[in-house]
Amino acid sequence: MLSSAVLKHGTACLFKRSSCSRSTSTCLCNNRWFLQHRRRQHQHHQQQQQHQKTMTSAAAGNSGAREAVEDRLESISNHSWVEKLNPDPETDVNAPNRKSRRVKSGHFVRVQPTPLKRPALIIHSKKVLEDIGLCEGDESSETFVRFFSGDSDAIPGMKTWATPYALSIMGQKHTSNCPFGTGEGYGDGRAISVGEVLNPKTNQRYELQLKGGGQTPFCRGADGRAVLRSSIREFIASEAMDALGIPTTRALSLIRSEGGDVSNRPWYSASVEKQVSKQLNEVTVDDPRLARFDASEREAIVGRVRAQKRDPDTMIQEPNAITTRVAPSFLRVGHLDLFSRRASKPDASPLQKQELEMLVRHCYFREFSEENDSWSSTAPIEDVARAVLEKSAAGIAFCVAEWLRVGFCQGNFNADNCLVAGRTMDYGPFGFLDAYDPAFAKWTGSGDHFAFAAQPQAAVANYFTLCSALSTLLKGKEAEGNVLIETFAKTIENEVTNVWAKKAWFSRRCAEFEQSSRARFIR
């Protein structure tokens, strides 16, 4: 069913050609970048001065700000996920739902985050603050810091929940990651949604989610926490990706614990690091084992050897932090994958089939419709499913091609880390290229399948998972799904071609000519 041979040939040729255009475009942009950088420095200085004035006035009227934050968030709250979809029927009997357990049905589990001790705001995004309907200065209030550090009692009108989803890697369904071997314990292990808001000025919906908010039924024995180091990386990277024009989840705030909340995390001991580095540096182009290769091949082999990754060898203690990430929704391919698995079982109940249809309709409503558009709730389900697949294809193809444009490698592009709308998320083992390397991957688990140049193929595999999940709802069933997959492979190849053409300063017309010429050459 899944065929990406053309895609592999196409991207391989494109990646080889792209390396020659890097230095030219960099030189041409240096002066322009410098001027823009100086302007940004000046603007940043002015913003800092204004921010200091705002902080001073906010501190003077702290109780008023506290009331304003609570009132504003509650007045614009609009919790479509928990109001339109089904709760886990075993939520109440398992309260407070902070232990790993099987979740057999329902789209969400009501669970409250675990507050950080002595929370302190480190940084926030002014733009995201305004996008969700708050005002500059609100972030300095006690209510804001309490709520977005996990104390949901600070704003009682906001609802909190975690969701289940499935794991598929390169199109293959997995259940071994689930402690029960059934896939019923996988989902938001340390991410807890703390509300949805509808900005009255823009009519745009946003979901607010705490990463590192504490344990949920999907924590699989982990502590549900994030550490400051990884939280800083997520905040900076997601805001940088947005500034680069790439679809992404955003970061509202970063709050750390100053009250002793810590987690043990694997890391690299200095002694082993020094020893390994010494061993790797001993491999040179003059190594007799490389004698049969030419000079360029020897350099490439030595480069790969020195760049190879190793697993952590020790544990260190790190302070906890919470990043509040924001998006129109966090609907993953893995969500639809899970509910399709439930609905496709031979003994599937009418409720399981209904919950799949409910989620598909909600997916269209959240990601692809205008706020007051009711089409997704009334149209035939086969039409809604196809519309989701078509619009998702365009979003994912564009997003992944843009990753290649800026040298971004997601590192763990499973179906559960792929948002249906095509938006970058889950800044875990990600990285940016220091030098062009198609095989670049950020961690030992990335393998070849999640390497930089393989991301278009990983996208095809994730789209295959999405089509497989919804094919039973399509009018043409699997045959229609096959056509959509083939179309997606061509779409993402076109997007990648256009990216390399832009980096080489070619026009779109040149890119199309190049693509047609390459296709004739391959044939």
Image (cartoon, rainbow, N blue to C red):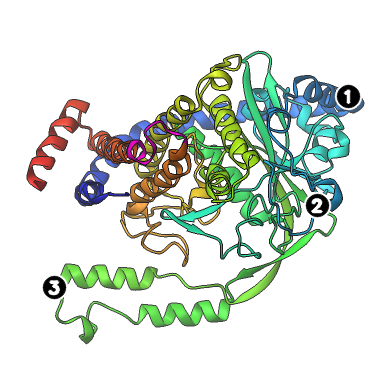
Q: Looking at the picture, how far across and down is residue 321, in whole percent?
A: 72, 51
Residue wearing tag 3 = 294
Crowding near pointer 3: few (<14 within 10 Å), some, many (20+)? Answer: few
- Whether residue 475 is in magenta: the answer is yes
Q: Residue 118 carries which label?
A: none
The first of marks 1 and 2 along the sequence is: 1
Mark nearer the viewer, 1 or 2 = 2
Q: Residue furthest bottom?
A: 288
Looking at the image, which is closer to me, 253 or 339? 339
497 lies left or right of 129: left
Q: Which mark is residue 97?
A: 2
Mark nearer the viewer, 2 or 3 = 2
What kind of residue is marked 3?
Asp
Q: Looking at the picture, how far across and down is residue 371, in whole percent?
A: 60, 17
- Whether residue 480 is in magenta: the answer is yes
Q: Which mark is residue 67?
A: 1
* CA separation in Å, label 2 and label 3: 60 Å
Q: Give the range drawn in magenta.
A: 473-481
